[in-house]
Amino acid sequence: MARLGEKLAERWLSLLVLPGALYLATIRAALTLGQTRPFDLPRLAHQVTAWAANPAVRTVGGQIVLLCAVLAAAAVAGIAARTLAAAIERVVLAADWSSWPGPLRRLASARVTARRTRWDAARLVVHQRREEAGRARALRRPHDPQELHEARRSLDRISPERPSRPTWTGDRIDAATVRLRRDHHLETALLWPHLWLTLPDTERSEISTARQEMTAAYVLAAWAVLYAPLTAIWWPAALVSLLLAMTARQRSRTAAEAYAQLIEATVRLHTGDLARALGIDHSGILTTQVGDALSDLLESRLPELDEHASTAGMQV
C-alpha cells in the first residue's frame, strides 16, 4: 500500500502539479513583464525578490499557506488541461462526427468529402503505377519501383483507407477496424473486450503504453490552447503555444500510427487463440469463416418476444 501511495503521489505530481505550476509561473511572469519588455529578466528577478521579502511570506505559517495555495491552483490547472485534452481527443478522432451539432457536422462533412476527392485521385495514381510496373515485368523490362512507392506514400499521407472521418488521425485509428472487417469479417468493437482478457501481459503493456502516448499528446495540445490566451498580455506566449501545438500534432500522429498497428497486429495474431478458447474449431490462417463464427457467437441475442405482450400490442 505504501508503494502504491508513492506511485499515486508521483503521478499526481508529474501529471498535474508540475505542468500546472509551470503554467502559473508563466502567468505571473507575463503579468510582470508585459508586452513592452517581454524578456526583462532583471525586472522579473527584482519582483520575485520583493515577493520573497514580504513579511507574510517569511513566516513558516505563511509559507505553508502559500505552498498549499500554489499546489491547489497548479492541480486545478492540470485537471483543466486533462479535461480539455479529452475534448480535443474526441474532436480529433471524430468517431461520432455525424452526431455533432449542425455547423460542426457540416464542416466535418465538407472536409471528409474533400479528403475523399484527394484520396480517390491519389488512389488512381497508385493503380496506374501498379499497371505500369505489371506491364514492365510482363515484358521483362527494367522498371523503377520508386514511383509506385512514392505514390503509395502520398496516398497514405491522406489516409490509409478511403477517408470516413475529417482528420488523418481519426482515419488511421479507423483503418484498423476497416481492414479487419474487410479481410477477416471481424468486428473490432465486439471482439476486443474478449480478446483483451486473453492477451499476455507483454501485449497488454505495449498497447497500454501506446494509448498513454496518445493521451499525453492531447494533454500537450490542451496546454497549447491554455497558453494561447496569455498572448494578450505577453506576446512570447504565442511562441510557446505554437511550439506545444506542433509537438502535440507530431506526437499524436506517431502515437496513433503505433496504436493502430498494435491493435491490428494483436487481433490478427491472437484471434485464433480466442476462437479455440470459445470452442470454435480453427487451425491455420485466420479465415472469414472464423470471423463470421466469432461475430455470431459474441453478438448479444435479442430478447425473446413475449407472445402475450405481442398480442396485447396488436389489440391496442
Image (tube, rainbow, N blue to C red):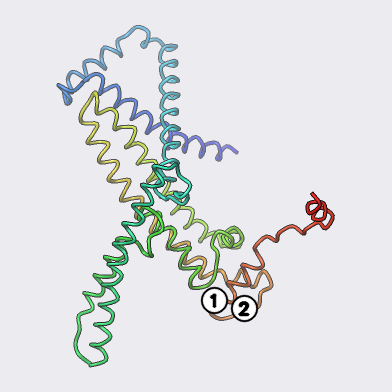
Image quadrant in which you'd find residue 74? top left
Picture quarter containing residue 62? Answer: top left
User: Callout 1, which amino acid?
Assistant: Leu
Q: Is residue 315 or residue 107 the one in the foreground?
A: 315
Residue 145: image x %, image y %? 23, 78
- At 32% from the left and 9% from the top, the residue drawn is 54
Q: Is residue 144 left or right of residue 161?
A: left
Mark 2–mark 1 CB contact (< 8 Å): yes
**Element at label 2:** loop
Q: Residue 172: where, in percent of width, then height?
A: 39, 59
Residue at which label 1 appears: 286
How much space separates mark 2 and mark 1, taking CA atoms?
8 Å
Q: Residue furthest front?
A: 315
Quadrant in which the N terminus appears: top right
Residue that appears at 38% across and 60% down = 163
User: How would you rate the neighbour count of disc 2 (Cα within 10 Å): few for under 14, some for 14-19, many for 20 or more?
Assistant: some
Number of numbered discs visible in the structure rendering: 2
Residue 233 image point, x, y percent: 24, 23
Residue at the extreme bottom = 139
- The image shows residue 160 at horizontal and vertical percentages of 36, 64
Q: Is residue 292 left or right of residue 302?
A: left
Look at the picture and state if 88 lies above or below 271. Answer: above
Work out whether 123 lies above or below 306: below
Query: Which kind of residue does numbered mark 2 sit on?
Result: His
Residue tagged 2: 282
